[in-house]
Image (cartoon, coloured by chain):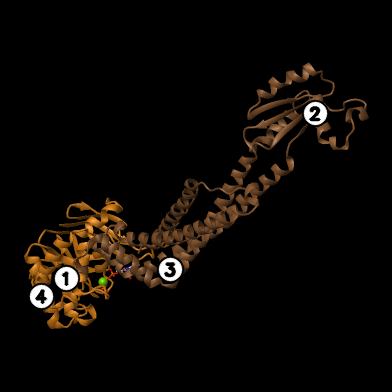
Chain colours: A orange, B brown
Amino acid sequence: MVELYELTKTYPNGVTALDQISLKIDQGEFVFLMGHSGAGKSTLIRMLIREEWPTSGQIFVASRSLVRMKKKEIPYLRRSVGMIFQDFKLLESRTVEENIAFAMMVVGASSRDIKKRVKAVIHEVGLDGKEHSFPNELSGGEQQRVGIARAIINHPVLLIADEPTGNLDQRTSEEIMELIYDINRAGTTVIMATHAQELVKTARRRVVILDKGKVVADMPPGAYMR
Amino acid sequence: MKTTFRRQSAYYYSEAFKSIRRNGFLSLATVTTVTVSLFILGVAILLVLNISSYLQGLADDVEISAFVDQTYTDEQALALRDQLLRLNGVEEVDFVSREEAMDSMQTRYSSSGYDLEETLESNPLPNSYRIKASDPQNVQALAQQIAGMEGFYRVNYGQDIVEKLFAITKGVRWGGGCIVGMTILGAVFLIGINIRLSIFARRKEIYLMKLIGARDGFITRPFYIEGIFLAVMGAIIAAIILMGGYEFLLREWTNTSYAMLFPLISDHNLLFRCYGILLAAGLLLGWLGTAISVRRFMDV
Ligand SMILES: Nc1ncnc2c1ncn2[C@@H]1O[C@H](COP(=O)(O)OP(=O)(O)OP(=O)(O)O)[C@@H](O)[C@H]1O
Ligand SMILES: [Mg+2]
């Protein structure tokens, strides 16, 4: 699903955020990305949707080379990758329903399909009854559920989450994780950057640890027990 | 919630009009600027059209008088006719013999009641040609060409009036062009600022749309609708004012004694084409202003 070959990213300011990273993630896998602040987790995630492009090396997502990808093809890559953010990134002036529907309208779906699918996804993430609420009327956990609904509405093959529980308490984090595990169980590959060690320990999934832009550990499920 | 599950086109328009309302006074200023600049453009076009049509009307009146060298015999003078006819842009050539010239002078001064030729003892007038140009714009060039020919010692034409009118048209073209250019630049600039503000107000949304996988066309369309709408509104207002003003002028003018001397264009096909140009110009301005801003500020 995701393949990196000697991927290096040096920002224009001279910081090398990723240093010769090689990594392979199979379809249906669940991978935690860990490492200290500044290790390069977010940079790696941004590379996967072509928000940043490599200084050298190769990236393939769903068999497509992002290095060779033309600017015009980027939207289509992003449609097959769902993104969840630490700060949710919801549109404040739109309701829950509108925020979720927006992602489908953007890709040109018909209003009938949107209506059907939005209803189903709202149920899936457990937001029934909140359709017409605005983001500032929701708890953090509920807002992240809206974020997740928006990320999965177009049936992505890959779900990328950058510290999705970073702004949530323990209990809410666990609820959100359950939701993400469900999505993974249904077949979607998941890559999640996080600092939440307890959460990763109990998860028993593959863990990749970055430090100063290098992969320093790649542990199979159950190995992360520190 | 009908609005939640909108089609894309509904989304484009609602976003565009939301922006127009949000920009409030600036939107109004933009429309006004476009109106002013296109109104001036319209006035300049109508002015040039009218002067050109007037000049065309002068074609019948402006003729060139070319005087044949006194050393030429009548036969030699008559032979020049073929050479004149061979020149480009010549519509008609009339030979005026010395006698005819004298006669006409005689008639003109007949009120004084004496024989001019007798008084002068001989006929001092030369043989001459009266030449009509097919295009009044060509009169000057044609006159110079004839003056350069063998056998003519002097060429007269309505120098004053022709040159003055050309100077006026040239002035209108240049002055009008400068003013129109400056106001149009201002209009494009204001449209650009409008769109820039709209982009800024929606930058979070634009960033999100990009991450979700919206194509650039989807993201920019509301801005194009906004820019083109503002500009075309301005153009429509300019066209209406111009049309009303010109129709009024036309009505008033025909009642005055100047109407005979300087008739205004009243060919409505031509006039409507002129108003159509304003609308097309509005469309172009809106598109241009938006395109510039979108190129510069959309790379979030
Ligand atoms: N846009 C940018 N321009 C320049 N340098 C950047 C940029 N983004 C990140 N960096 C630098 O790249 C390095 C890696 O940053 P990155 O955000 O990928 O780390 P991270 O692992 O996500 O950290 P955190 O856990 O704090 O989110 C850091 O040194 C950071 O300062
Ligand atoms: Mg980060």
Q: How would you rate the neighbour count of disc 1 (Cα within 10 Å): few for under 14, some for 14-19, many for 20 or more? A: many
Q: Position of residue B111 (x, y in %)?
A: 85, 37
Q: Which residue corresponds to mark 4?
A: A126
Say which residue appears at 89% left-offset and 28% top-offset: B117
Q: Are marks 4 and 1 on the same chain?
A: yes
Query: To which quarter of the image does residue A148 belong?
Result: bottom left
Q: Output the chain of dot 3.
A: B
Say which residue appears at 44% left-offset and 59% top-offset: B236
Cβ atoms at labels 2 and 4 below 8 Å apart: no
Q: Give B39 or B202, whichever is nearer the viewer.
A: B39
Given the image, on which type of amino acid does mark 1 rest?
Ile
Q: Output the chain of dot 2.
A: B
Q: Give B50 or B185, whichever is nearer the viewer.
A: B50
**Residue A57 in view, yes or no:** yes
Given the image, on which type of amino acid does mark 3 rest?
Ser
**Helix or strand or loop: what does disc 4 sit on?**
loop
Q: Give B191 or B204, whichever is nearer the viewer.
A: B191
Q: Output the chain of dot 4.
A: A
Q: Which residue corresponds to mark 1?
A: A148
* Left or right of B44 in this view: A33: left
Q: Which residue corresponds to mark 3?
A: B27
Q: How would you rate the neighbour count of disc 4 (Cα within 10 Å): few for under 14, some for 14-19, many for 20 or more? A: some
What distance separates the C-alpha of mark 2 from that of mark 1?
101 Å
Q: Earlier in the sequence, mark 4 or mark 1?
A: 4
What distance separates the C-alpha of mark 2 from that of mark 4?
108 Å
Q: Which residue corresponds to mark 2?
A: B101
Cβ atoms at labels 3 and 4 below 8 Å apart: no
What distance separates the C-alpha of mark 3 from that of mark 4?
43 Å
Q: Which quarter of the rendered image does ligand 1 occupy?
A: bottom left
Cβ atoms at labels 3 and 2 below 8 Å apart: no
Q: Position of residue A6 (x, y in %)?
A: 24, 56
**Helix or strand or loop: what does disc 1 sit on?**
helix
